[in-house]
Image: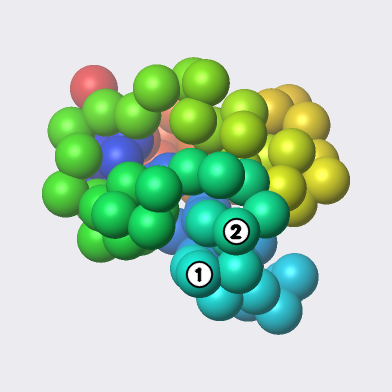
Amino acid sequence: MQLNEAVSKRLLELLDSYGMTQYQLHMKSGVPKSTIRNLVNHTYPSVKLRVLHELCQAFGISLYDFFSSPLFKETNLEP
């Protein structure tokens, strides 16, 4: 799986586990709705760490927590 797809899946997991919509995440994080939508749909080839940090703050988690998912294991990611 591509890295942007793993980020998308992780965001969807977090949205589901926190019971949040993309709109609620936008309101809480200040990240534009279009950016969140593009991340979820993995239409961006990459994502800025600053944006991920802002999303993590909205979830109340650290970047470490975000990336501690099995989705980011090297064996699951394409080079």
Relative depth, front residue between 76 and 51: 51
**Residue holding disc 1:** 23
Task: State the image coordinates of residue 25 (x, y, percent, origin top left).
Answer: 59, 60
Q: CA distance from mark 2 to mark 1?
A: 6 Å
Answer yes or no: is residue 66 visible.
no
Relative depth, front residue between 32 and 59: 32
Task: State the image coordinates of residue 79 (x, y, percent, origin top left).
Answer: 23, 22
Question: Judging from the image, what secondary structure is the residue with disc 1 in?
Answer: helix
Amino acid type of the residue that numbered disc 2 sits on in the rendered structure:
Met
In this rendering, would 54 be left or right of 36?
right
Answer yes or no: is residue 40 visible.
yes
Task: State the image coordinates of residue 29 (x, y, percent, origin top left).
Answer: 62, 46
Amino acid type of the residue that numbered disc 1 sits on in the rendered structure:
Tyr
Label for residue 32?
none
In this rendering, would 17 be left or right of 41?
right
**Residue holding disc 2:** 27
| Quadrant in the picture for residue 47 | top left
How was this image coloured?
Answer: rainbow
Relative depth, front residue between 3 and 20: 20
Are the residues tagged 2 and 1 within 8 Å (C-beta)?
Answer: yes
Residue 69, relative to residue 46: is it above or below?
Answer: below
Question: Judging from the image, what secondary structure is the residue with disc 2 in?
Answer: helix
Q: Residue furthest right?
A: 60
Q: Residue at x 74, y 51 (%)?
A: 59
Q: Residue at x 67, y 54 (%)?
A: 28
